[in-house]
Image: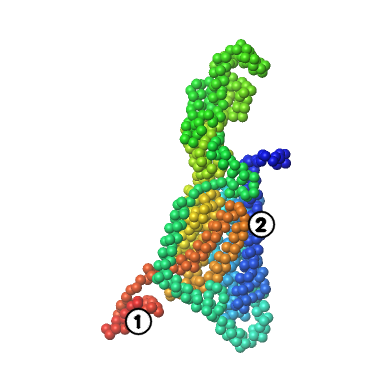
Amino acid sequence: MKSNFTSNIINAVTMSSTLITAEIVRAGISLLPFTAIGFIIMCIFSTVTTIVSSVLVSQFHYLQVVTAILACVSPLLACSTALGFLLWGGLRFGSILCVTPLLVLAIGVDDAFLMMNHWQQTYQQKMVTKELSKERISKRMCNMLQEVGPSITITTLTNVLAFGVGMLSPIPEIQIFCIGNATAMIVDFIYQITLFAAIMVVVGRCELQAEKSMYPVKYKKRKELDDLNSLLKKRVYFSNFCYLKLENSKHLLNKYCSVLCTTSFSVLTVAGLLLYWSLSIYGAVTISVELKPEKLIKHDSDIVKVLQLRDEYIMQHCAPTLIFVGRPGNLNNPNNIRMLHKIAEDFEALPSSLGKTATKFWLRDYMDFIANAEQVSFDSLIDSNRNNEIYEFLNRNLTAITIKQFDLQNFFAWPEFHHWNGFVQFDLDKHGMGYLKSYFFIISSHSDLRKWSARAKLLNQLRKVADRYAMHEVSVFDDDAKFLDIIEVLVNQTVQSSIFTVLFMMFVCFICIPQCTAVIVATFSIISIFIGVLGLLSLWNVDLDPIVMSALIMSIGFSVDIPAHVTYHFFLADEDTTEASLQHCLKEIGFPVLQAAFSTMLCVLSLQFSDLHMALVFVKTMSLVIIIGFIHGLVVIPVLYCIISRIRYPRRKVVFDITATTCPKAVAVSEHKTVKLTTDTELKISAL
């Protein structure tokens, strides 16, 4: 149109469902360059953190840079494989799939960080215990997968199941998004334990050879090997919370865990949780359900201008809706004619209707035409100097006009009513005679219909009227019904999907972590994170729409990652006290959790430079998931374990006879307990 029409006064723009679809696809494709930006950011972050951590513990090898980069390549390869097979298999391309590579990259690297971290821990332990010369890479890989494999499996299963629940959504775009992400997560898991693990084996062999080449004599002479290991033992093996083996790091970690286990900090944490839940629940219950096509389109599109003009000048004053009648029946039957009139009158009786004057209904003109034709004589029409076309028409159809069975097709052939032909559809009966098969008419409504939620309510009101006339197959058509219908199911679908997803998360955690306490703590954290994400998104001026629903389903799966790692390693910690278990847990996964949180945040923030609503929603959602999940993993979950330990093991006084032939199987005496031997030969163990 722009090439065929130019004007300094009139700005002509076009809009159709085809153009809207094309603009939505264009908007999605515009996100692909941000995947490249996110990949570069992830490679830089992964390389820098890997180099720094390895240098400070004297384990650096240049091939570790290759490992760090390939840790970022593996998720993209998995995403390419998954989406390629899906599209080749017939999956329809949706613009929302353009976000999948960046999401898989941001989340998939987390497992690689965990694997690399434990790989370096095993390497350091072998050096300290004089077993580096006897190191077998296959045994080292088995130990690594044995330690981190369940944790990686939990996160993968939960992510896949979360997207699997989303596949059941009736909204097509959400189905496509969930299918693509779930498949990509599965392929990424396979690549992590095969392709990336193989790369780690190759790099590990090179590191081992390089280490031996640095000390060729020491590996031959036992005494000098002992000297080397003695030197390594002097380094304090501190926790991986910061992954820096400095003398004060262990002290800081122990101090941090001691603070977490204090009663005052537990009370403060519970108070903070109550405030957090209050704000989150308030935001969740007050979230508005809204959907606008312009949110799916780039701001520079002409479609956005058209939609804004339509909302401002049309939808508030005269919003048209098409009413289809699939079985009008016999028009020679007066009762049937009255029924067809009543159908239109019921729609016009709605409070939002503009009434009869704004309705475009051919049957009313048809009835007026019949009434006028029966009263006007042929001669009077001649005297009125009407044109020859009318004269010839009436001359041919005078008999039809004067009888009751007026030929309907002649009415539509009349020049003044010829435009009604687009409103009706004729067909032939078994005798070869034409009859009216179906028709539609247009009603107009007025209200504040700029909000699509208000339009969805109006559409439901119109459909309720149409349902009264199922015999005539009355239906309602709106150009934006494919968007309006989504609004009605968003809340129910979001609630149902969330409940089923949380139940699946709980089931997976129970399978991989066979301890009720760990499962309860992990499930509690998942629910708390989800409520926080939903509520804070609402307070962040984000309305519930299909994109937000997709992001929420994704957030449930991703919110499992940090709680699952923490609870699983706490479960593995075989320590006497909760504080010692926390120290062991944070020492094992503290640094990988920090790596994963910061890398994911940096990767997703690259979308912040896009002006697309879809990109900003995922940035906000992922930011909240990471921040809230990080706080839950390193603060809330440890505090919960401390509170549970106090509930399960209250202060008690145990008294037993020391002269008995058998003693209790286990008497735990911690540093907070004292043993006193009384004069009456009773041993009293009192918890102070």
Looking at the image, is mark 2 or mark 1 nearer the viewer?
Answer: 2
| Location of residue 257 with respect to 415 vertically, above or below | below
Viewport quadrant of the N terminus? top right
Say which mark, if any, is on residue 512: none
Most distant residue in the left direction: 680
Tag 2: amino acid: Pro
In the image, 344: left or right of 103?
Answer: left
Residue that badge 2 annotates: 33
Q: Residue at x 59, y 44 (%)?
A: 308
Viewport quadrant of the C terminus? bottom left
Tag 1: amino acid: Val
Q: Residue at x 63, y 13 (%)?
A: 382
Name the image quarter holding residue 81.
Answer: bottom right
- Spot occupied by residue 73 in the image (x, y as percentages of width and height): 65, 63
Q: Secondary structure at mark 1?
A: strand
Give the mark, 2 or 1, whose residue is nearer the N terminus. 2
| Location of residue 456 with respect to 51 vertically, above or below | above
Q: Residue at x 35, y 81 (%)?
A: 675
How crowded is the residue under tag 2: few (<14 C-alpha within 10 Å), some, or many (20+)? Answer: few
* Spatial separation of the CA atoms under disc 2 and disc 1: 68 Å
| Location of residue 193 with respect to 8 vertically, above or below | below
Q: Can you see residue 151? A: yes
Most distant residue in the right direction: 3
Front position in the image: 24 or 124: 24
How crowded is the residue under tag 1: few (<14 C-alpha within 10 Å), some, or many (20+)? Answer: few
Residue that badge 1 annotates: 675
- Spot occupied by residue 422 in the image (x, y as percentages of width and height): 61, 29
In the image, 211: left or right of 441?
Answer: right
Most distant residue in the bottom direction: 223
- Spot occupied by residue 227 in the image (x, y as percentages of width and height): 60, 87
Name the image quarter holding residue 684.
Answer: bottom left
